[in-house]
Image (tube, rainbow, N blue to C red):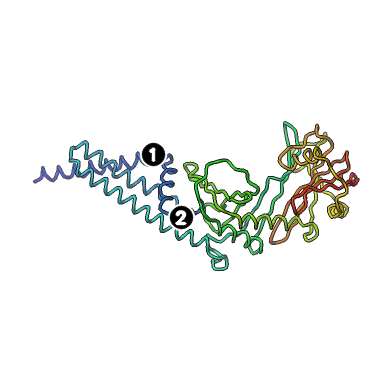
């Protein structure tokens, strides 16, 4: 009897060690397995932003597979028979299936919460968007091979603003999510801030004329990129950016300028405040009085799309300005050619406007 008890104790101890060994091996390679595990689990549930995807599911899968793998290895080594191994594999499959069901239930709940109207969410809800930041590729950079500075067009919408609710409604309407791996050009980058979410607070979307793109990132790397039909969202973002560029309806302030000279050192410290903003605003409201040729349009246009203004480009001045209230902050840029006496900026229709006027007195 004692010999039989000793055998069973040894048998149980060996199985426990085998299971622990299997689990340890799985957790050693967990980071490499996280991406394929999430891709597999997404088959069971709706696509939700990565900041809301629970991170314990890969651990659960590794625990189940590691335990089953360790026990199967022990059974094969101890020649316990193929039927026992088959039962263990069946149990592992059932365990992973249960994890998939749990993932489906939780992601479905998350998806439903994210589609709720904002007024139905509690103020402390992790699914309540509290800020939306929109950035564009439009910017003016000044510098050389060693140093540089610049500012870009952007819009920050705070909680309570009508524009935030309108754009978030467009985000809630994203549909037909499909995997997408090809490169794309984006007009706007949208960051949705959920300040009540404890760990990850920002969801990132990139849009063009028709689609929105979202990358799902895990600790182990990229889970994938999702493409959505997003005409409503794109239209709302275009509308908001167009509205805030309306020079007549929104007060512009905080004008500053930067240009390359012998004192240039890179960074925001090079920006000089423009004092006589009324003169500059008057010219922004004035009708276009200069007709550039195609070569001039191309030359000036390249600086608004990432081309850096260098000393070799002439006496060009990058100007930034903003419009700010408690509910929003809009920033934009324009260009002044001191040699040609040309003010170049984009209007609410995103068309370049050219106003010929001597504004040198603003940039002393």
The foreground one among 42 and 273 is: 42
Vertical relation: 244 (above or below) 28: below
Give the tally of numbered discs: 2
Q: Residue furthest left?
A: 1
Q: Nearer the viewer, mark 1 or mark 2?
A: 2
Percent x, y for residue 51?
51, 52
Percent x, y for residue 274?
84, 49
Q: Locate residue 8 relative to residue 130 in the image: left or right.
A: left
Mark 1 element type: helix
Mark 2 element type: loop
Categorize mark 1 by other alpha carbons within 10 Å: few (<14), some (14-19), many (20+).
few
The foreground one among 72 and 224 is: 224
Q: Residue at x 43, y 43 (%)?
A: 34
Residue identified by numbered label 1? 28
Q: Locate residue 103 relative to residue 237 in the image: left or right.
A: left
Q: Residue furthest front?
A: 294
Q: Quadrant of residue 82?
A: top left
In the rendering, which numbered label is found on residue 46? 2
Q: Residue at x 41, y 54 (%)?
A: 103
């Amino acid at each position: 009897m004692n010999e039989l008890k000793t055998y069973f104790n040894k048998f149980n101890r060996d199985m426990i060690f085998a299971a622990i060994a299997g689990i340890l091996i799985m957790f050693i390679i967990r980071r490499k397995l996280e991406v394929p595990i999430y891709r597999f689990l997404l088959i069971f549930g709706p696509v939700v932003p990565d900041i809301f995807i629970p991170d314990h599911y890969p651990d659960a899968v590794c625990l189940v597979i590691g335990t089953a793998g360790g026990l199967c290895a022990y059974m094969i080594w101890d020649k316990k028979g193929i039927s026992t191994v088959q039962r263990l594999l069946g149990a592992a499959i059932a365990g992973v299936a249960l994890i998939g069901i749990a993932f489906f239930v939780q992601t479905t709940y998350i998806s439903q919460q994210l589609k709720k109207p904002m007024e139905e969410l509690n103020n402390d809800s992790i699914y309540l968007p509290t800020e939306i930041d929109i950035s564009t590729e439009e910017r003016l950079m000044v510098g050389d091979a060693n140093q540089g500075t610049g500012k870009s067009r952007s819009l920050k919408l705070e909680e309570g603003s009508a524009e935030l609710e309108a754009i978030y409604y467009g985000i809630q309407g994203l549909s037909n999510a499909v995997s997408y791996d090809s490169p794309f050009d984006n007009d706007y980058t949208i960051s949705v801030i959920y300040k009540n979410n404890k760990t990850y607070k920002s969801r990132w979307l990139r849009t063009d004329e028709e689609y929105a793109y979202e990358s799902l990132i895990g600790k182990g790397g990229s889970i994938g990129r999702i493409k959505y039909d997003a005409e409503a969202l794109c239209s709302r973002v275009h509308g908001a950016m167009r509205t805030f560029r309306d020079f007549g309806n929104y007060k512009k302030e905080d004008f500053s300028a930067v240009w390359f000279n012998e004192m240039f050192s890179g960074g925001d410290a090079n920006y000089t405040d423009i004092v006589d903003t009324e003169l500059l605003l008057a010219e922004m409201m004035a009708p276009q009085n200069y007709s550039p040729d195609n070569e001039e349009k191309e030359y000036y246009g390249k600086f608004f799309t990432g081309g850096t203004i260098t000393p070799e480009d002439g006496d060009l001045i990058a100007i930034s300005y903003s419009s700010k209230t408690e509910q929003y902050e809009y920033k934009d840029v324009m260009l002044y050619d001191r040699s040609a006496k040309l003010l170049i900026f984009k209007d609410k229709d995103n068309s370049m406007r050219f106003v010929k006027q001597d504004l040198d007195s603003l940039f002393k």
